[in-house]
Image (cartoon, helix red, strand yellow):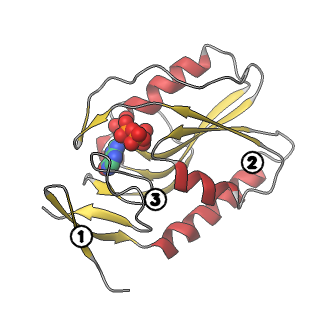
């Protein structure tokens, strides 16, 4: 596949992970989740906005009985984490005694998932795990284990497949990495 370079706002990005690889990795993740959650009827909690493409492609491939709900959290401005995770909006389900799987597009500093895990654990679920499309292990600032990671990436800003740079780029089919 030919690499493609695009301009978003003031920055140049180049194709980094093609759609075919994304789907292949998501398929493997779905198979693993099917095995681990057979008979557990998990509740998938998708963190908007960035996770929408990942959630759709993952859940089409999960075949066990499950529920899905969407919550909204936000912490990024420009290319940097503000370090503050706003309160959860939209968690209407009672998660007491439930097996919860958080679905994220990316775990970067880990502030978002860490804050969410703390808030969810107060509601006494049976278990909580995280499934993410992308993870930047070198950026993680919290001591936590992310159980399901489709792809680890270096510490470079990425866009596409749900991820944005100040609102743009979410609709791209591939993941692009910053060039300059
Ligand atoms: O590990 P962290 O450093 O916390 O970064 C990860 C979070 O950042 C992005 O969300 P963002 O706050 O940009 O909102 P969005 O999903 O609406 O783009 C992404 O969707 C994750 O939720
Ligand atoms: O690299 C990134 N790109 C877009 N959004 C993000 N949120 C955390 N890290 C990133």
In the drawing, what numbered circle is on residue 151?
Answer: 3
Relative to residue 57, is residue 112 depicted above or below?
above
Q: Which residue is mark 1?
A: 6
Q: Which residue is mark 2?
A: 36
Asked if the residue at tag 3 contacts the one at tag 1, i.e. Cβ–Cβ closer than 8 Å, the answer is: no
Relative to residue 137, is residue 90 depicted above or below?
above
Asked if the residue at tag 2 contacts the one at tag 3, i.e. Cβ–Cβ closer than 8 Å, the answer is: no
Quarter holding ligand 1: top left
Q: Position of residue 7 (x, y in %)?
A: 20, 65
Report helix, strand or loop for mark 1. strand
Relative to residue 40, is residue 151 depicted above or below?
below
Q: Sequence order check: which comes first, mark 3 or mark 2?
A: 2
In screen coordinates, is 115 left or right of 56? left
CA distance separating discs 1 and 3: 22 Å
Q: Position of residue 19 (x, y in %)?
A: 48, 72
Pick the residue in front: 104 or 149: 104
Residue placed at 31% from the left, 53% from the top? 168
Specify whether residue 154 is in view: no
In the drawing, what numbered circle is on residue 77?
Answer: none
- Disc 2 versus disc 1: nearer the observer: 1
Residue placed at 29% from the left, 26% from the top? 83
Q: Position of residue 147 (x, y in %)?
A: 57, 44
Return the residue found at the far top: 122
């Amino acid at each position: 596949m030919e690499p493609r370079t695009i301009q978003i706002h003031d920055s140049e990005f180049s194709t980094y992970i093609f759609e075919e690889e994304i789907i292949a990795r998501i398929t493997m993740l779905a198979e693993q989740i099917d095995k681990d959650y057979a008979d557990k009827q998990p509740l998938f909690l998708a963190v908007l906005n960035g996770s929408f493409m990942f959630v759709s492609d993952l859940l089409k491939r999960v075949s066990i009985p499950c529920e899905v709900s969407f919550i909204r959290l936000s912490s990024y401005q420009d290319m940097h984490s503000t370090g503050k995770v706003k309160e959860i909006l939209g968690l209407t389900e009672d998660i007491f005694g439930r097996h919860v799987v958080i679905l994220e597009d990316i775990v970067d500093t880990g502030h978002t998932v860490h804050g969410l895990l703390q808030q969810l654990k107060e509601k006494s679920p049976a278990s909580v795990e995280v499934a993410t499309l992308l993870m930047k292990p070198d950026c993680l600032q919290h001591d936590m284990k992310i159980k399901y990671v489709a792809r680890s990436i270096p510490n470079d800003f990425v866009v596409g497949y749900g991820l944005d740079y100040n609102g743009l780029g979410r609709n791209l089919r591939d993941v692009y990495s910053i060039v300059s």
